[in-house]
Image (cartoon, grey):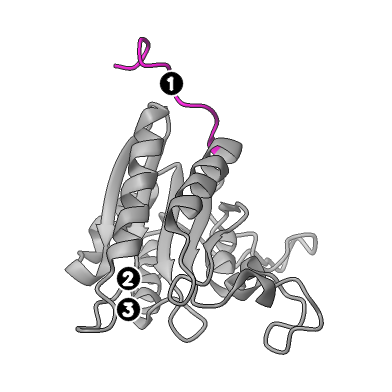
Amino acid sequence: MAKVLIINAHQLYEGWSPGNLNRHLAEIIDQEMQARGHEVRHTHIDSGYQVDDEVQKHVWADIIVLQTPVNWFGAPWKHKKYLDEVFNAGLEQQLLIATDGRTRTDPTRQYGMGGLMQGKSLMMSLTWNAPAEAFGNPEQVLYQGRTDHDAFLHIATCYRFCGAEVLPTFSCFDVIKNPAIDADVERLKAHLSRYFGAKVPAELAG
């Protein structure tokens, strides 16, 4: 059994972005993880949090799942604030990261090798207005061949800097103009199966 922390980074904008889709996907991830026998905890950043509690949740978790909308090509600004506060505290407390990895005595140590989150993994689940064809195609004007995973390298790198493995990103595309939520949910379930295994048979659960 793994310990799973689901972070919902949706930020409410009244009359524009109520957060229903990201809430729904976080619930699906919860259900799917529990069906695999995993223990799940949640953080919804917009509902408030205590920094030290979030550090302890990261210490506790084997798997961190970030569920977030894409606002102006990144996660909502409160998520950046959350990362800064949690990882700064995790460094100060020497719980998530100890150093930047470099030493004056061992030249083989690289920048980014001082993390304490080895054995943990991060998966990002994103909701985009952008269509799928905007990614992975060098002829597309915006991302010029880069992937949805590349677009969130800044967040992936925070976790890798602290020693965690970063799993392939899941994305729901075109969710405003051409939503296909039922199909997206099935793809999400398949993505979770690919990286976290099959569900526990009902007769063995509990």
Disc 2 marks which residue?
10
Q: Which residue is at a point 58% across and 40% down the rendered structure image?
A: 195
- Which comes sooner in the sequence, label 1 or label 2? 2
Q: Is residue 117 visible?
A: no
Label ID, residue 161? none
Q: How crowded is the residue under tag 3: few (<14 C-alpha within 10 Å), some, or many (20+)?
A: some
Q: Nearer the viewer, residue 201 or 85?
A: 201
Q: Which residue is mark 3?
A: 78
Residue at x 40%, y 37% (from the top left corner): 32
Point out the stretch of residues depicted in magenta: 196-206
Q: CA distance from mark 3 to mark 2?
A: 9 Å
Name the residue beneath numbered marker 1: 200
Does the magenta portion include 197?
Answer: yes
Q: Earlier in the sequence, mark 3 or mark 2?
A: 2
Q: Most prominent secondary structure in the magenta stretch?
A: loop
Element class at badge 2: loop
Residue 179 screen position, x and y as percent: 46, 66
Residue furthest top in the image:
203
Amino acid type assigned to the residue bearing label 1 in the image:
Val
Label 1 element class: loop
